[in-house]
Amino acid sequence: MGYFEEYDLDSRFKSIIQSWDPVHGHYHAVTDWDQRRTIMVSTPEKEDDEEVIFEALENLIDDIPADVVHIAVSRDLELLSSSTNYESDWTMIPFYPSPTDFPPVPTVRRSQLTEIERLGLQADHTTYEPTPGETKHVVFKYYMNQGNVVMFWNEANCTLRIPRHPNIVPLDRLVVDSPGRGPEVVVGFTTPFIAGGTVSDNVSRVFTLNHLRQLTSAIDYLNLSLGIVHGDICMWNLLIDPGTDDLKIFDFNLGAKLGWEGGKNHRGAFRYDEHRNDVKLAIFTLYEIITRDLSFREENHPHELDSSTILEMDWKQHPEVRLEEGVEVLEYRRVLEDWAKSRGTSDIQDYKQAPESIDWPPLPQFPLLGVGWAKSREAAQMRQSMVRWGEPFLKWERPPTSHLPLPAGQRLLATGEVVGDACNENAA
């Protein structure tokens, strides 16, 4: 079922906090991205190494009921007890904007999406029926943590405003849901699903000169026409449509407005970082496509990467990599280097200078949380507080990958609910 079948512990689990109190003793609060849940793990002695906690969870969590929010383990990391007491719940419910905060865009309810495969953290391959009898395959991108509130707002607004382009994956629909009796909110968005995997996944697929030219042309369009920087050009953010053989760029969560300093109240989200400029990253990307050498990006931060180092090296084609028949590596390099030189003379330094620049309003104000004088505007609220005060909230918990695929006749909705085929997928 995808991403979480084989994973590093650090890619499945994230330690939110470790602390001590008289009730729980020493504990870690950990998010499990696979089951989309947060659980507190108490240990008899202080344990600073989060990897030890992750290893304990890996052995236990797939068999712990979804409503359990706290477990205690022994010195040998064996399960001692579990609790569903909401006062031990470290789950945070993030702020979700209203559909009215966005331009008019088609929507789909989260309950209408059926999970097919887990593609990564907070990204799933799903299907829905736009019309009766028609099945549409899409990627559902969402967020369930406060750290992605601002990133999602900018990525969704950027993606939906980019005009249709043959080499950029477009936004399909906004995904909405209603927390209990509350009004609809936007919890994510969908983009068309393109089969065949990324350029990183599919080594044996031919990468042609035309694919390279499509990449550089799409980057020019984003940077010079729209004033948008993708910020994360790499093999795993490139697709090749098997139907048209067109290269497509996707995933703008690290994007930026060219020259922009970022939102003042949100730590500079979507700000421009010259070290993540698309020309430099495209040079590294072509090098990695041809050589399959990822060491430069794995061992260095963006500000430490120097494209001149790559251009001064001999590029040795990986034995499994297939390039266009009759075209040498030197020709790929010539096309790339001619383009990079032409971009060095660009006069566009700020997104507002771009002839078709796109922009969008800042993230709506967070709601006031708390009581009396202690009220403040926060990006998230603890679920235990919402339970205590009877406030509605969204649930994300779902079965672990190890329990999939489901028995015949059952489907897993994007809400995390398991239903039978008889369920009306289009029901609200």
Image (cartoon, rainbow, N blue to C red):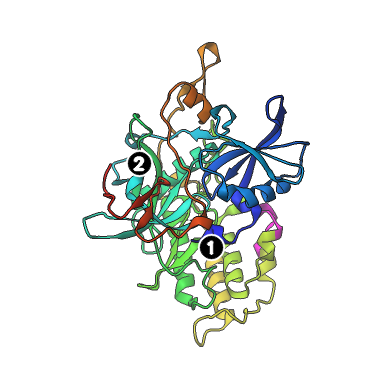
In the image, what residue type sits under mark 1? Trp
Crowdedness near tag 1: few (<14), some (14–19) or many (≥20) residues, C-alpha within 10 Å? some
Measured in 3D between alpha carbons, the distance from the residue under mark 1 to the one under mark 2, in whole angstroms, is 27 Å
Question: In front of the other: label 1 or label 2?
Answer: 2
Q: Is residue 150 left or right of residue 175?
A: right
Q: Position of residue 195 (x, y in %)?
A: 41, 67
Name the foreground residue: 134 vs 404.
404
In the rendering, at what x and y percent does residue 279 appear?
55, 60
Q: Residue at x 57, y 26 (%)?
A: 87
Q: Is residue 264 above or below residue 351?
A: above
Asked whether 107 or 276 is in front, the reply is 107
Instruction: Name the quadrant containing residue 74.
Output: top right
Between discs 1 and 2, the one toward the N terminus: 2
Q: Residue at x 43, y 32 (%)?
A: 393
Residue positioned 40% across, 45% down in the render: 415
**Where is residue 224 shown, x and y percent of the image?**
45, 55
Q: Which mark is residue 176?
A: 2
Nearer the observer, 246 or 388: 388
Residue on which disc 1 sits:
236
- Of residues 229 and 190, the one nearer the viewer is 190
